[in-house]
Image (cartoon, rainbow, N blue to C red):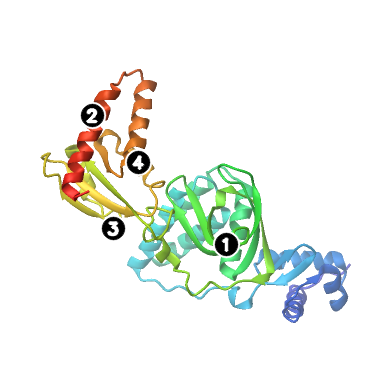
Amino acid sequence: MARISEQSQQQLKERIILLLRQNAGGLSEQEIAAHLNIERRRLNNYLNDLQVEGKLDKEGRLWYLVPQEKFSTRALDLEDEEAVILYLAARLFVKQRDTRIELAENVLMRLADILSQDMGLGDDVQQAALELSRRPKDPHYEDVFRTIIRGYVFHRKVKITYQPYKGRRFETIFAPYLLEPSAIGYSTYAIGYSSIVDALRTYKIERIVQAEVLNHEAFQVPNDFGGLGILQNAWSIYYGEEVVRVVLRFHPDVTKRVQETYWHPSQQAWADPDQFGYWCVQFEVADTTDIKPWIRTWGANCEVLAPQELRDELTGEARRLAQLYGWQTSHSQTQSTSEADHSRFADIFGE
């Protein structure tokens, strides 16, 4: 059989794209072969090539055209300092991942090549890509990750099977409006509309068991969706309109470190009026779930003054830790201390 030239192959691919552009509802492989009068085996190779290139996608038996304006992005012209910012962002992404993602490796290698030629800074970025390549590979997660990204970029709904941390797995049609990484648990979250509850939901991508882009089901992000603004009251990922006031008191050993960082937009801070050297910080967050790991990192150098529910929860944890390490604690003493501190806190804030 005579070898088909690259030019002929490219022309056939263009014909496939034109055909699917005229058939937005999708076509099966058999229908495409009939329209173009081409052998199925040969056509299948071209369809798979176009899918890898991000120009086509498949749902069930039907092939669909990815919107043409999404095929590529414009060239990014960066100043030297801007390129370094991009490197730092890439470095942070690598630190945030605990599994290998070849898609990210490709981006880092491209960035390394650009910085090497233009600024001589590519070695660091290449090292970041190498570091990512050494992480354990999870092909299933990478497939899900790519699928969710594709739905987000092309505004296509995604059929997902989700396994909550607690409870039974379920299926839903999901429109990913926003992607948000979280340093807690090396995780990435998708926020958007979920059909099963007919409302906004946040899904942890690592808990998505299966994902399939529904190319014929486009979505528009509602005008009243606040984008990143919905996270303004979140410590990390848990958001909401109502807020909880969290007040913490830090030991003098860590006061300087606490003062070095602006931890949250709602932050207020003051010197403890009754204990010299102690520093109090207040946050208003939608939920205390994702601030608790941060509080725990400070150990005994951080005391929760409010809300009482959070203080009681961490008091219980401290008691269990003491038992775990063989220390005996006096419940009555702990309780009286807790009540005294809460009373003093109420005096200060008029509660």
- Tell whether 239 sits left or right of 248: right
Q: Dot 1 lies on which element?
A: helix
Amino acid carrying mark 1 in the image: Ile
Cα distance in 3D space between marks 1 and 3: 31 Å
Whether 293 is drawn above or below 181: the answer is above
Dots 4 and 3: beta carbons under 8 Å? no
Q: Which residue is the site of mark 1?
A: 149
* Between discs 4 and 3, the one toward the N terminus: 3
Please tell me in which quadrant of the rendered image residue 57 appears. bottom right
Residue 16: % across, % down: 76, 76
Upstream in sequence: badge 1 or badge 3: 1
At 76% from the left and 73% from the top, the residue drawn is 26
Front-lying residue, 177 or 317: 317
The residue carrying pointer 4 sits among few (fewer than 14), some (14 to 19) or many (20 or more) residues within 10 Å by Cα, namely few
User: On the image, numbered disc 4 is attached to which residue?
Assistant: 309
Which amino acid type is marked by label 2? Ser
Circles 2, 1 touching at the beta carbon (< 8 Å) = no
Tag 3: amino acid? Ser
Dot 3: what SS?
A: loop
Few, some or many C-alpha atoms within 10 Å of disc 1 (few <14, some 14-19, many ≥20)? some
